[in-house]
Image (cartoon, helix red, strand yellow):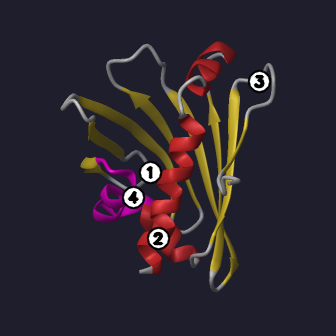
Amino acid sequence: MEQKTKVVADEGKQEIRISRVFGLPLESLFKAYVVPEIIEQWMGTKVIKLECKRHGSYHFETTDPKGNKHGFNGTIHEFESNQKITRTFEMENTTFPVQLEFLEFQDINENNSKLDILIVFKSVSDRDNLLKLPFAFGLNMAHNKLEELFSN
């Protein structure tokens, strides 16, 4: 089955482009990225801190099946409700360097919206190392869960 979340990584570039059209109103899609209780449901992660504002920050924590905790954090540089979030993203205790993420939310009609994400990496090899993980598959699964949350 084809994945709804499209992940594009052009050869030799330090970026990944992600896009998906959701069967959700724009406000619902945006809430899924800024309301801790909703984030925890679709991402399967605990929200330790989330300051949705310019110069705000966030800290998430996930526990793997073996009980190991994995942290993710960053700083929010731009925040425009229902439009965009620009932030850094760091996976704690890994060799991956900080990434820069540009999330843009678009209204298509009253029942559909689109999310475009551009992730910029320090190097092409850092980007390629992330792509060796089941990144696209996991992101698609999470986005499917996000869409299901609002359809129930």
Q: Secondary structure at mark 4?
A: helix
Horizontal side, residue 114 vs residue 78: left or right:
right
- Main structural element of the magenta stretch: helix, strand or loop? helix
Q: Residue at x 46, y 63 (%)?
A: 146
Q: Nearer the viewer, mark 4 or mark 3?
A: 4
Which residue is labeled 3 in the image? 13
**For residue 115, which quarter of the picture?**
bottom right
Q: In the drawing, what numbered circle is on residue 11? A: none
Q: Which amino acid type is marked by label 2?
A: Glu
| Residue 47 located left or right of residue 134 | left
Of residues 136 and 18, the one nearer the viewer is: 136
The residue that mark 1 highlights is 54
- Report the Cα–Cα distance between label 2 and label 1: 30 Å
- Residue named by callout 2: 148
Residue nearest the viewer, comparing 78 with 34: 34
How far apart are the alpha carbons under marks 1 and 3? 28 Å
Circle nearer the N terminus (1, 3) = 3
Q: Quadrant of the C terminus?
A: bottom left
For disc 4, the marked residue is: 42
Is 39 magenta? The answer is yes
Q: Position of residue 99 (x, y in %)?
A: 53, 29
Residue 125 higher or lower than 29, as above or below: above
Q: Secondary structure at mark 2?
A: helix
- Magenta residues (range): 33-45
Q: Measure the C-alpha gap from mark 4 to mark 3.
A: 30 Å
Q: Position of residue 130 (x, y in %)?
A: 56, 25
The amino acid type, in three-letter code, at marker 4 is Trp
Q: Earlier in the sequence, mark 4 or mark 1?
A: 4
